[in-house]
Amino acid sequence: MPRIRSVAVFCGSQRGNDPAFAEAAQALGRGLTEAGIRLVYGGGRVGLMGVMADAMLAAGGEVVGVIPDFLMRREVGHPGVTELLNAHSMHGRKQRMFELSDAFVSLPGGIGTLDETIEIITWRQLDLHHKPVLLCDVAGSVQPLLATIDAAIARGFASPQTRALFEVLDGVPAVLGRLRHLSVQPGGGAERL
C-alpha cells in the first residue's frame, strides 16, 4: 500500500487562548513538510489555519487551500499558498478536501472545526470512506468532543464501535509518528457523498 501523501487538517480560524494551540499548528506545518506530506486545509490566512500554512510554506512545503467564494469575498483567503481552490459552498469545500486527501487530522478549533471533524467521522461510519481520522489532543482540546461522543454511546444513540472510527493522539509528535505508519486505504469515494 502507498504511504500517506496528502493530509486534510481541520483547525480554528481563531488562534485560541492557549499559546500551545499555535505552537501545535506551527509544529504540524513543519512536520508535514519534513515528512513530504502535502497539506490540504480550509484556505484561510487567519487563526490556526494561517499559522499552520505559514509554517509549512516557510519550511518549503506544499499547501493547498480550499475556500468557498463567500469567504474569499471577506478577504480571509491565504494569498501565498501553493494552490488556492474555490468552492461554491461549505459542503463543496469539505467534499473537495476529502477528494484531495489520504487522511484527516483535527487540531483545536471552534464550531467549524467540530463540524468538519464530526462529518468526516460520520462519513466513515456510513462506510463512505476508510481514510484515517486522527484527533490531535493539544492541552486537553479533544476531551470535550470525546465526552460528547461517549455520552451518545452511553445513551444508546451511537455504537461503542464509534470510538474505532478515529484515533486520539497526544500532541503533534504523536500525530506525525502515526502518519509515518499509515498507508492509503482503498474504498469509499467522493462520488458517494
Image: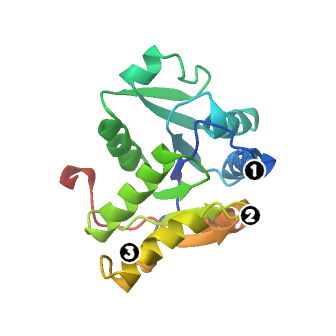
Q: Which residue is at the front of the view, 6 or 173?
A: 173
Q: Amino acid at mark 1?
A: Ala
Task: Check whether the beta carbons of the residues at disc 3 and disc 2 lie within 8 A of each other.
Answer: no
Image position, residue 154 (x, y; %): 40, 83
Q: Amino acid at mark 3?
A: Ala
Task: Check whether the beta carbons of the residues at disc 2 and disc 1 lie within 8 A of each other.
Answer: yes
Q: Which residue is mark 3?
A: 152
Q: In the visual, does 186 lie left or right of 74?
A: left
Q: Quadrant of the N terminus?
A: bottom left
In the image, what residue occupies the spot 49% across and 37% down? 42
N-terminal-most mark, 3 or 1: 1
In the image, what residue occupies the spot 52% across and 64% down? 145
- Please, what secondary structure does the residue beneath circle 3 have? helix
| Nearer to us: label 3 or label 1 | 3
Q: Is residue 127 above or below residue 41?
A: below
Q: In the visual, does 189 lie left or right of 52?
A: left
Q: Is residue 91 above or below residue 186?
A: above
Disc on res. 173: 2
Q: Which residue is at the front of the view, 126 or 55?
A: 126
Q: Which residue is mark 1?
A: 27
Q: Residues within 10 Å of mark 3 (few under 14, many from 20)?
A: some
Q: Is residue 160 above or below residue 50?
A: below
Q: Which residue is at the front of the view, 27 or 140?
A: 140
Q: CA distance from mark 2 to mark 1?
A: 8 Å
Q: In the visual, does 28 lie left or right of 5?
A: right
